[in-house]
Image: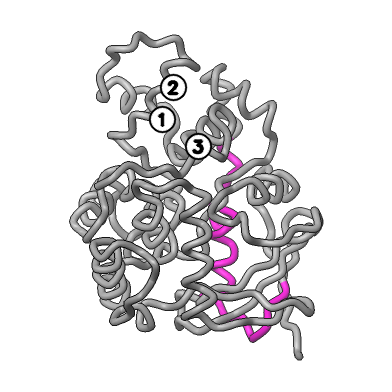
Amino acid sequence: MTTHRFVIDAEGPFDFGAALRFVADWPATSALPFDGRALRFAYCAESDWLPIGVTVTAAPGGVAVATTRPAGPGVRGEVARVLSLDVDGSGFASLGEADPVLGELQRHNPGLRPVCFWSPWEAACWAVIVQRSSMLVASRIKQRIAERYGARVTVDGREYPAFPPPVTLVEAGGLGLPAQKEEWLRGLARAALDGVLTTEHLRALAPEEALAELRALPGVGPFSAGLILIRGAGAPDAFPGDEPRLFAILREAYGLPRDTPPAAYRRLAEAWRPYRSWASFLFRATAYGVADEERAPSR
């Protein structure tokens, strides 16, 4: 099988090792095998919804990528987005100089950028599957859906199931989920096919507009909307304005009173522009740990 290779350069600090450690502990990717040196996965590329296998390894100043089929600009952009390498991060460190609390996190986690789902579509499906469920159970269900309905792609001699594209799930049943969740997934599949659940569409909107549009989708509440926009589409400068768990982390980090109103957290986050998503990710990933990160509440 022909392998297609390219390099993605990082603008600003980036540590691929830190990204690998995050993915190894992240419930959404717990089924992936890891050897500590490479990130390997299969997914349906958002640019054409066809399956593709990807291997990412460290390279000077960025990462080296190998794919199982030719990677045009769409796929290259998608792989870059997964590791937040599609954003110039050279200004992120300066935020920590003005905000000592954030700066302390940056010093303990140099080069850690948000790690995203393979697509906003997969992020949306995860957000529905995990509702009122443990993340371990949700991860297993998502894996079973991929194995039953998705294509298998051989990456470095090993088969990886790709989570199925929207067209496959738009009429699918028997997903091992409650009927309401299956109906929500079919609604999300239709939204993805209409171009709503795509990186290009969501990042073309102002973050507040994108969050409002996402909240109008079936099964998507405030927490899920933020997850899809920030960890799906990789929007670098969004702040989830109604997320109690993040607020609790910020209260502890900044010594804020328990009755601090949501508007105060939004004002705090204004100082993190244009990296509000990155700062929020760093607080979440280092305060409570990955294991608590994606336990979405019910809609």
Q: Residue at x 56, y 36 (%)?
A: 285
**Of the residues tagged 3 and 1, which is closer to the observer?**
3
Picture residue at 32% right of the left edge, 77% below the top? 173
Q: Which residues are magenta?
A: 66-92
Give the residue drawn at x 25%, y 56%. Answer: 219
Q: Secondary structure at mark 2?
A: helix
| Circle 3 Cα neighbour tier, 10 Å, few/some/many (<14 / 14–19 / ≥20) | some
Q: CA distance from mark 1 to mark 2?
A: 6 Å
Residue that mark 3 sits on: 292
The reply to whether the C-beta atoms of the residues labelled 3 and 2 are less than 8 Å apart is: no
Mark 1 sits on what residue? 246
- Please, is residue 54 above or below residue 261 in the view? below
Q: Which residue is mark 2?
A: 250
Label pair 1/2, CB-CB below 8 angstroms: yes
Q: Position of residue 287 (x, y in %)?
A: 55, 27
Mark closer to the chain start, 3 or 1: 1
Q: Is residue 210 visible?
A: yes
Disc 3, SS: helix
Q: Amino acid at mark 3?
A: Asp
Compared with 88, 242 (above or below) is above
Report if residue 132 lies within the magenta region. Answer: no
Q: Residue 35 occupies which quadrant of the picture? A: bottom right
Whether label 3 touches label 1, CB < 8 Å = no
Residue 32 percent location from the top left of the image: 66, 61
Residue beneath the point at 70% across and 51% down = 20
Position of 261 relative to 110 (above/below) = above
Badge 2: few (under 14), some or many (20 or more) residues near its Cα, within 10 Å? some
Camera-near label (3 vs 2) is 3
Q: Amino acid at mark 2?
A: Leu
Relative side of 289 to 121, left or right:
right
**Residue at the farthest left position:** 216
